[in-house]
Image (tube, rainbow, N blue to C red):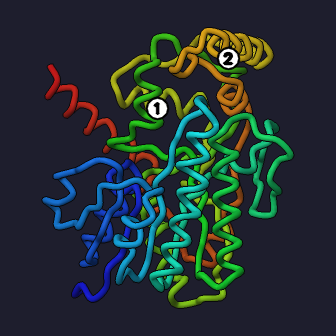
Amino acid sequence: MPADRIVLVTGGAGFLGSAIVRMLLARGEMVRTVSRGRYPELERLGVEHFATDLNDINALNQACRNVEAVFHVAAKFGTWGPYEEYYRANTLGTINVIQACKENGVSRLIFTSSPSVIFDGRDIEGGDESLPYPARFEGPYPETKALAEQAVLAAAREGLPAIALRPHLIWGPLGFHLVERILSRAKRLRLIGDGRNLVDTIYVDNAAWAHILAEQRLKENPSLSGRVYFISQDQPIAFGQMLNQILAAGGLPPVTRKISPRSARVIAALLEGMYRLLRIPSEPPLTRFQANAMAKAHWFNISAVKKDLGYAPIVSTEEGLRRLAEWLEKIDGSNS
């Protein structure tokens, strides 16, 4: 496929962003990226990289010049930290991307949202895109991502063709958000409850593929603008089973110790209070948001994305786990 257009990926050096970049390059696209640091590996792939912050309006406008489509993936992740930092990165950064798209005549915006924007601390079993935002959020990340998603949907109503995707628990090789957290905490992990609560996950290449499809389908059918879609493996799994499969891929034993959801929330509240009182900048070992998320069911009906975008996973969970184990073995060998 000859490169006859330019596409921009914000957060192109990150976990999901880099997967989208690789997929776009494989399709023959001319790709630009925006991330705060410099990444020579991107330039070696032929990517035009802008090392800038999303709040640098001039640099963002330059990055969006002559761009046909933007994949806005960049975000500040986590369940702890000053609200202002999350708001600046997630909400204001997204507002700036929207403005740059408008000023530069970008034809389509695909925004990476999160299912956490509708999580209210209760079980979600087969929920769909009609679920409302909660009255209150238990953390700055879901709140600021919800505000960002609302800004994207407002821009769509005002004429900027846009779709928001909500990938749930992205994992795979290079997956330092979920996989690294699980492996690094293996010795002190506990199941909260019995571990049988069903959750959705998504392998990173499937999440990237959904983004590619969203941009294609939006180009073909502009009436899809303003839609929000959950995306997943379409295969809910018990949370304890998911944890243990990732641990097994890393050659580690399964989690067997358990704690009640009530005890976990009490401990999390105490830890949060202590970290605030002592002004400890790092994340507590457990937060209330994490305690709730690990104890509750959260899986979604993805019939809308299958119907509208033609989405289906291109990598099975079994194949994804095989690739993850292979990658973990490789990096473990290189570190020994």
Q: Residue at x 77, y 47 (%)?
A: 125
Position of residue 132 measured from the top left corner of the image (x, y, whole percent): 82, 56
Measured Cα–Cα span from mark 1 to mark 2: 29 Å
Q: Residue at x 48, y 77 (%)?
A: 215
**Residue, far right:** 135
**Residue, far front:** 58
Is 206 drawn above or below residue 155 in the view shown? Answer: above
Horizontal arrangement in the rendering, residue 233 relative to residue 266 (left or right): left
Dot 1 or dot 2, earlier in sequence: 1
Mark 2 surroundings: few (<14), some (14-19) or many (≥20) residues within 10 A: some
Residue 277 in which image quadrant: top right
Position of residue 180 measured from the top left corner of the image (x, y, whole percent): 40, 30
- Residue behind mark 1: 245
Secondary structure, mark 1, is: helix
- Residue behind mark 2: 272
- Look at the image and tell me in which quarter the C terminus lies: top left
Horizontal arrangement in the rendering, residue 29 relative to residue 284 (left or right): left
Q: Residue at x 59, y 82 (%)?
A: 161
- Look at the image and tell me in which quarter the N terminus lies: bottom left
Residue 286 in which image quadrant: top right
The amino acid marked with disc number 2 is Glu
Position of residue 42 measured from the top left corner of the image (x, y, whole percent): 21, 57
The amino acid marked with disc number 1 is Gln
Which dot marks residue 112?
none
Secondary structure, mark 2, is: helix
Mark 1 surroundings: few (<14), some (14-19) or many (≥20) residues within 10 A: some
Is 52 drawn above or below residue 256 in the view shown? Answer: below
Position of residue 12 measured from the top left corner of the image (x, y, whole percent): 35, 57
Q: Residue at x 46, y 54 (%)?
A: 74
Horizontal arrangement in the rendering, residue 247 relative to residue 280 (left or right): left
Horizontal arrangement in the rendering, residue 137 relative to residue 220 (left or right): right
Query: Are the residues at dot 1 and dot 2 in contact (C-beta closer than 8 Å)?
Result: no
